[in-house]
Image (cartoon, rainbow, N blue to C red):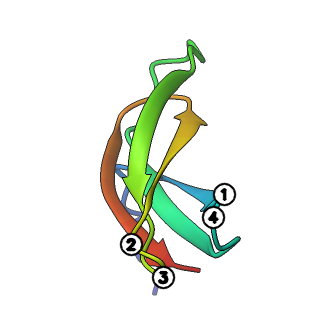
Amino acid sequence: MSHPQMKRSYVPVTVSCIHCKQDQIVHVQPGGGCWSRAHQCVLCVNCQQEFEVMVPDAIIAGPFLS
């Protein structure tokens, strides 16, 4: 019996903290085919310091430990 596949409403992107080097995952809104990068800040799950990342669209969840 096959199950219909659900369309994922996010794209997981791995980012690394510039302070403590912890890898973490953010969920990014899927783009409409145009990859314009946007600067955004993430609060590190390990050292609690903010760092800037460039991702293709808006961060909608995370960060999560990878």
**Residue type at numbered disc 2:** Gln
Q: Quadrant of the N terminus?
A: bottom left
The residue carrying pointer 3 sits among few (fewer than 14), some (14 to 19) or many (20 or more) residues within 10 Å by Cα, namely some
Q: CA distance from mark 2 to mark 4?
A: 10 Å
Q: Which residue is mark 3?
A: 46
Image quadrant in which the C terminus is located = bottom right
Of residues 53 and 59, the one nearer the viewer is: 53
Distance from Cα at disc 4 to Cα at disc 3: 10 Å
Disc 1 or 2, which lies upstream in sequence?
1
Choose top left, top right, bottom left or bottom right for residue 23.
Answer: bottom right
Q: Are marks 3 and 2 in contact (CB under 8 Å)?
A: yes
- Amino acid at dot 3: Asn
Residue 35 in the image: state x and y as whole percent.
60, 18
Q: Earlier in the sequence, mark 2 or mark 4?
A: 4
Q: Quadrant of residue 43?
A: bottom left
* Residue at x-position 55% and y-position 17%: 33
How far apart are the two marked residues, 4 and 1, measured between alpha carbons? 4 Å
34 w.r.t. 44: above or below: above
User: Is residue 29 depicted above or below 42 in this figure?
Assistant: above
Residue type at mark 4 is: His
Asked which secondary structure carries label 3, the reply is: loop
Q: In the orientation shown, which residue stands out farthest toward the bottom?
A: 1
Say which element carries label 1. Answer: loop
Cα separation between marks 1 and 3: 11 Å
Q: Is residue 42 visible?
A: yes
**Other residues around mark 4 within 10 Å, as few (<14) / some (14–19) / many (≥20):** few
Q: Which of the pair 25/44 is nearer the observer? A: 44
Where is residue 15? Give x, y as percent: 62, 57
- In the picture, the disc for residue 19 is 4
Label at residue 18: 1
